[in-house]
Image (tube, rainbow, N blue to C red):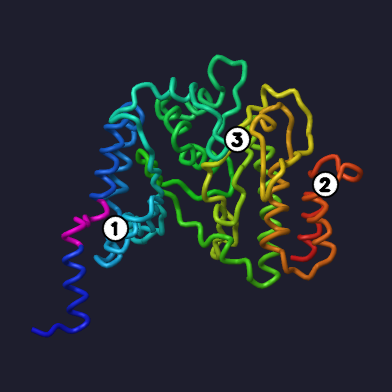
């Protein structure tokens, strides 16, 4: 029997769907959540009801889309799903990000103890320790309605859901959180990453640059006496929503959080370590001084990437001065940030 190309495609899809056991997405997320509950029952017990509601609202993609996603998960550990959520009479575009962790056992017993024994993680989340018996960040989040076990777990394994929710409430440009379901975080789709706009028209890149400098200052000043220092301020972790005309920070896993209520230091210039890109020493961030590291990273991203080919001599000079911040002319980068904002606003 001769089958057409279309018929062969259908047969292949059906065969692979059966082989890979590709299930409806709501069932996939429900099973993942149940797996997380078994991993740490106390951490996610309060999430069952809102997560169940989210799962039921997920609009199922085509069999072909589910097949492609199933195949990609066989070779790519980054579990990122682009979903449509049926909310009343409209559909909302969501992104579900799942953190894959290598737990040492089938159930985590004492995540608080594990966190205290954790060694410095320059590439993940680091909470600067203080003389307080328990970090103020934990008690702060408990007062905001988070369960203590959940806070300790997320700080240990996947801090982005915690910070995303809080920063959104504090008016930071981050996606809206729809639900945190164990190790899966559902957030609004904030558009395409800035890597897509490296060759965009000049006016748009200037607007993006302005918002990035403003974001670097906002993170540095933080919220509730907590300063946020990103250690991965890159184009892949920032997105631009063409509908809202806003730049959003879409990933918050690589962060140093400083409790400024215990800090007695003053504003100070950050000195990058030897090496390419953003090199850093976590202990410097936790020294008690207000460092300009976020501004440095924003200027570096603009100079070497987003505004690299921009024909604007004054702007290029300011970016170079911001990055280099030579001792004879620069005590810190905060003034360079304000100067850049003025120039970018005048060119916008």
Residue 127: give x, y in percent of width and height: 57, 29
The disc, 2 or 3, on the residue closer to the chain's N-terminal end is: 3
Residue tagged 2: 325
In magenta stretch: residue 89: no
Q: Residues within 10 Å of mark 3 (few under 14, many from 20)?
A: many
Q: Circle 2: is it few (<14), some (14-19), or many (20+) Cα within 10 Å?
A: many
Q: Which residues are magenta?
A: 17-26
**SS of the residue under disc 3:** strand
* Residue sitting at x 19%, y 55%: 21
Quadrant housing the N terminus? bottom left
Q: Which residue extends farthest left?
A: 1
- The image position of residue 111, as x and y in percent, is 40, 25
Give me the C-alpha separation between circle 1 and circle 2: 48 Å
Residue at numbered disc 3? 256
The mark that comes first in sequence, 1 or 3, is 1
For the residues labelled 1 and 3, the Cα–Cα distance comes to 34 Å
Q: Quadrant of the C terminus?
A: bottom right
Q: Point out which mark residue 70 bears.
A: 1
């Amino acid at each position: 029997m001769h089958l057409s190309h279309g018929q062969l495609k259908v047969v292949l899809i059906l065969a692979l769907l059966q082989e890979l056991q590709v299930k409806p997405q709501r069932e996939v997320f429900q099973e993942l959540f149940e797996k997380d509950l078994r991993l740490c029952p106390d951490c996610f017990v309060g999430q069952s009801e809102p997560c169940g509601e989210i799962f039921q609202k997920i609009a199922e993609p085509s069999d072909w889309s589910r097949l492609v996603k199933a195949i990609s998960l066989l070779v790519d550990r980054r579990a990122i799903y682009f979903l449509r959520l049926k909310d009343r009479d409209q559909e909302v575009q969501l992104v579900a990000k799942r953190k894959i962790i290598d737990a040492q056992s089938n159930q985590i017993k004492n995540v608080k103890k594990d966190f205290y024994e954790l060694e410095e993680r320059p590439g993940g989340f680091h909470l600067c320790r203080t003389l307080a018996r328990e970090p103020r960040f934990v008690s702060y989040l408990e007062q905001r309605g988070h369960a203590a076990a959940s806070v300790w777990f997320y700080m240990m394994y996947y801090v982005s859901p915690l910070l995303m929710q809080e920063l959104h409430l504090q008016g930071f440009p981050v996606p809206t959180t729809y639900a945190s379901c164990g190790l899966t975080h559902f957030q609004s789709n904030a558009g395409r990453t800035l890597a897509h706009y490296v060759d965009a028209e000049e006016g748009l890149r200037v607007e993006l640059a302005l918002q990035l400098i403003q974001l670097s200052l906002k993170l540095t000043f933080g919220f509730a006496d907590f300063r946020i220092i990103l250690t991965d301020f890159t184009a892949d972790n920032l997105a631009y929503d063409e509908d809202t005309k806003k730049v959003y920070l879409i990933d918050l896993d690589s962060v140093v959080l400083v409790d400024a209520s215990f800090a007695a230091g003053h504003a100070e210039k950050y000195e990058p370590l030897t090496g390419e890109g953003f090199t850093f020493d976590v202990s410097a961030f936790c020294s008690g001084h207000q460092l300009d590291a976020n501004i440095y990273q924003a200027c570096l991203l603009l100079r070497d990437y987003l505004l690299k080919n921009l024909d604007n001599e004054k702007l290029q000079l300011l970016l170079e001065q911001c990055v280099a911040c030579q001792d004879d002319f620069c005590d810190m980068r905060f003034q360079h940030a304000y100067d850049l904002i003025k120039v970018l606003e005048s060119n916008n």
